[in-house]
Amino acid sequence: MTKNPLFRPFAHKSLTLENRVVMAPMTRSKSPNETPSESVVDYYRRRAEGGVGLIITEGTTIDRAGSSNDANIPNLYSPRSIEGWRKVVAAVHAAGSKIAPQIWHQGMVRKAGTGPRPDGKSDGPSGLAGPGKQVAEPMTDADIADTIDAFARAAATAKEIGFDAVELHGAHGYLVDQFFWEQTNKRNDEYGGDLTARTRFAADIIRAIRNSVGSDFVIIHRFSQWKQQDFGAKLAQTPDELAAFLAPLVDAGVDIFHGSTRRFWEPEFQGSNLNLSGWSKKLTGKPSITVGSVGLKGADFIESYRGKGAEIGELQELESRLARGEFDLVAVGRALIGDPKWPVKVRDRRFDELAAFSPASMATL
């Protein structure tokens, strides 16, 4: 067995991986008519052939009219998109990797009149696109019930297609995260209130997913402190608050937490070097995925969209923290965009063959 902890096997419930390298979910907007094409099949196949243990796909929208702002983002409900995903899953499995879709609703980030169903209304707990930005009516009880059902149906479809797990996108200021965040959730019913109460929407989704996929199918939950509306936002100011936030999600059925940070090495709270994923594992006992500028130094992924590149970064700290058990899996984003063979090159210590990240490589997304 290799001494590098990145390349040790991982198993949880029905999910078994050859290594700890995860391809991070990254929006591509390269699925015309919301349908994964042969180029999408090839994109994921090449990362599987490059040695990724688990691929988490780009955000894939649910059957709700306002879930998407772009007809080039794939969905997980139309017959043609489902057939496209079947081809992706088959290609990834043939190359020896596992794959999970990230199921997604953009919420109030989606502007009214955009996307494949422009007449659909944008959904949000309180109709707020950001702090103080009222642009729509709050979701009704019927809207919430239909959305929960749409997430559960998407997960059931994923399992039927042959995906190996499913990830709920509950981060970055999109719909699920808008329920978490006090700046966008001003409800005074059972879906509003304090931080613990604001987890109810996500918990109801997770329970519905669990009921639709069974007890052994792995549910990953991605969450973040930061929001695209406010990079400095924090749901939890202390470990105790984070514990209160995570507990209802564990009770609902989350198997693995994916704590999204922009730089994996940054501590989440004072007095400890643990990052968000490290804390989620410590507080819940559940396996966790770390992410954030893995294999790179310099600009983070937000700055990459502004035209900034990133140099190759060392992996010693990452590997040491993984070996200590701070987290269990490592999500790699931009490093895999420029080099689909990043995992095998790292495994074989062929560091001189790795390339720095340049904004031009974003075109391969």
Image (spheres, rainbow, N blue to C red):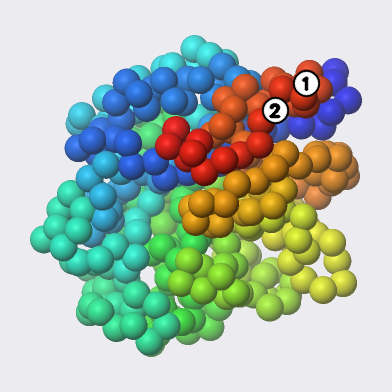
Q: Which residue is mark 2?
A: 354
Coordinates of residue 227 in the picture (x, y in percent): 51, 68
* Residue located 20% across and 29% down the image: 80
Q: Which dot marks residue 350?
A: 1
The quadrant in which residue 338 appears is: top right
Amino acid on which the number 1 mark rests in the picture: Arg
Question: Is residue 96 shown to the viewer in this render?
Answer: yes
Other-residue count near label 1 (Cα within 10 Å), few / some / many at <14 / 14–19 / ≥20 = few
Tell me if residue 321 comes above or below residue 269 in the rendering.
above
Viewer-nearest residue: 205 or 110: 110
| Image quarter (top left, top right, bottom left or bottom right) of the N terminus | top right
Label 2: which secondary element: loop
* Residue located 84% across and 28% down the image: 4
Coordinates of residue 348 in the picture (x, y in percent): 78, 18
Coordinates of residue 248 in the picture (x, y in percent): 57, 65
Tell me if residue 112 comes above or below residue 348 in the rendering.
below
Tell me if residue 94 comes above or below residue 42 in the rendering.
above
Q: Are marks 2 and 1 in contact (CB under 8 Å)?
A: yes
Coordinates of residue 234 in the picture (x, y in percent): 61, 74
